Image: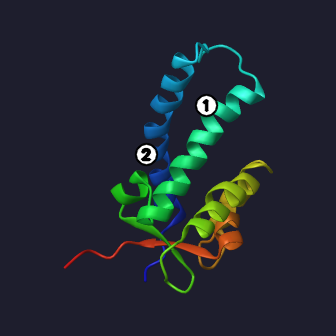
Amino acid sequence: MVIASPWRRLVASLVDSLVLLPLSLLLMALAGVDPLGPTTWVQDLLFQWLPGWTYYTAFTALYGATPGKMALGLKVVRTDERPVDWLTAFMREVVGKTLSTLPLGLGYLWAFFHPRRQAWHDLIADTLVVRASRPG
């Protein structure tokens, strides 16, 4: 099991952002919200946070990776190397990433210094991001 570098994880996250941005813009347009104008916290929750939480939780629980992680050859596993279940995915992607984000993103930076490259959300959910093994 090869633990993924924080840089590779960052690139995977950027790929996922490219998937999520058009989705958020579409949802805002369908609701008649100007995506370039100011938004309320409720609009942010409805058009950015909830779709993001759903996307990350579902892909992580169902496939062990988001499309961004898949494209970069990464996957999320529990520290005992078992696949991630729905509760673990929820704890990592919703609870953990919210806590990682709030104090100026410090929870994400933690992965650069942790010996197993775990960010706060990984520590909360007892997960690791690893290089996916190649089939065959």
From this view, report whether residue 47 is shown above or below residue 132: above
Q: Position of residue 49 (x, y in %)?
A: 65, 40
From this view, report whether residue 5 is shown above or below residue 22: below
Residue at 43% x, 79% y is 2
Residue at 54% x, 71% y is 85
Frontmost residue, 78 versus 102: 78
Frontmost residue, 124 versus 45: 45
Residue 47 tag number:
1
Residue at 66% x, 13% y is 37
Which is more N-terminal, label 1 or label 2?
Answer: 2
- Mark 1 lies on a secondary structure that is helix
- Mark 2 lies on a secondary structure that is helix
Label 2 neighbour load within 10 Å: few <14, some 14-19, many 20+: some
Q: Classify residue 30 as left or right of residue 111.
A: left
Residue 71 tag number:
none
From this view, report whether residue 92 is shown above or below residue 20: below
- Name the quadrant containing residue 48: top right
Q: Which residue is mark 2?
A: 15
Frontmost residue, 6 versus 81: 81
Q: Classify residue 45 as left or right of residue 135.
A: right
On-image quarter of the C terminus: bottom left
> Callout 2, which amino acid?
Val
On-image quarter of the N terminus: bottom left
Distance Cα–Cα, label 2 vs label 1: 19 Å
In front: label 2 or label 1: 1
Residue at 74% x, 29% y is 42
Circles 2 and 1 in contact, beta carbons < 8 Å: no
Q: Position of residue 53 (x, y in %)?
A: 60, 48
Frontmost residue, 42 versus 126: 42
